[in-house]
Image (spheres, grey):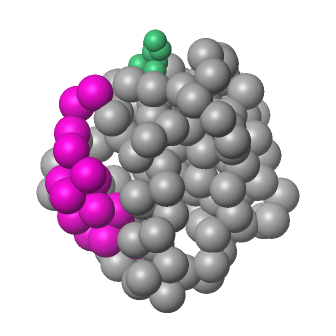
């Protein structure tokens, strides 16, 4: 399984720690930048990873900014993306099991690297339960198409 990852300048230092951890867990990783800690804008990195998920260049995405909020909002503007911001593992797990999230975001100003690793592992190992949750995820897709839910 291939994971796409990106950050902004605030999330930049945490990114390589998560990249190494993902490789340790056996995942293939594609780093969509940035390549330096120079001030940048989170929307373009949110979009890069979101695009790579919808085109299936990668299977899932991980995004890091100061809070995880801006970069996840940007990613959620891309059709087909269900990005969640998490600062604890329980929500991360349920967001995959019930909402089939395809991008995980968190904030480097909010959580430390060890908690981030726990969240990443819970999220990656959780599986979508489909069933009644599948209907609701389809309803979210209908909103994107301007259909009735
Ligand atoms: C950048 O200063 C900061 O706004 C960004 O990292 C993020 O927290 C936005 O949601």
Answer with left or right where residue 41 lies relative to residue 63.
right
Where residue 41 appears, as percent x and y from the top left, is 65, 18
Query: In which quadrant of the rendered image does the N terminus lie?
Result: bottom right
Above or below 110: residue 129: below
| Image quadrant in which you'd find residue 146 | top right
Residue 141 can be seen in this image? no
User: Foreground residue, 42 or 129?
Assistant: 42
Above or below 61: residue 110: above
Above or below 31: residue 82: above
Where residue 34 appears, as percent x and y from the top left, is 67, 38
Query: In which quadrant of the rendered image does the C terminus lie?
Result: top right
User: Foreground residue, 122 or 148?
Assistant: 122
User: Foreground residue, 96 or 47?
Assistant: 47
Where residue 80 appears, as percent x and y from the top left, is 68, 47
Which segment is the magenta one?
A: 109-124
Where residue 118 appears, as percent x and y from the top left, is 22, 64
Above or below 108: residue 23: below
Answer with left or right where residue 55 lies relative to residue 59.
right
């Amino acid at each position: 399984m291939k994971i796409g990852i990106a950050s902004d300048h605030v999330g930049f230092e945490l990114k390589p720690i998560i990249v190494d951890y993902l490789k340790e867990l056996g995942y293939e990783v594609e780093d969509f930048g940035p390549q330096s800690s120079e001030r940048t804008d989170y929307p373009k990195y949110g979009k890069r990873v979101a695009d790579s998920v919808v085109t299936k260049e990668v299977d899932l995405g991980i995004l890091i900014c100061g809070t995880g909020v801006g970069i996840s909002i940007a990613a959620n503007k891309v059709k087909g993306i269900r990005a969640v911001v998490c600062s604890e593992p329980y929500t991360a797990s349920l967001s995959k099991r019930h909402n089939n999230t395809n991008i995980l975001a968190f904030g480097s100003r909010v959580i430390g690297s060890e908690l981030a690793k726990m969240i990443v592992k819970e999220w990656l190992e959780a599986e979508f339960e489909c069933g009644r949750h599948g209907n609701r995820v389809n309803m979210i897709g209908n909103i994107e198409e301007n259909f009735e839910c």
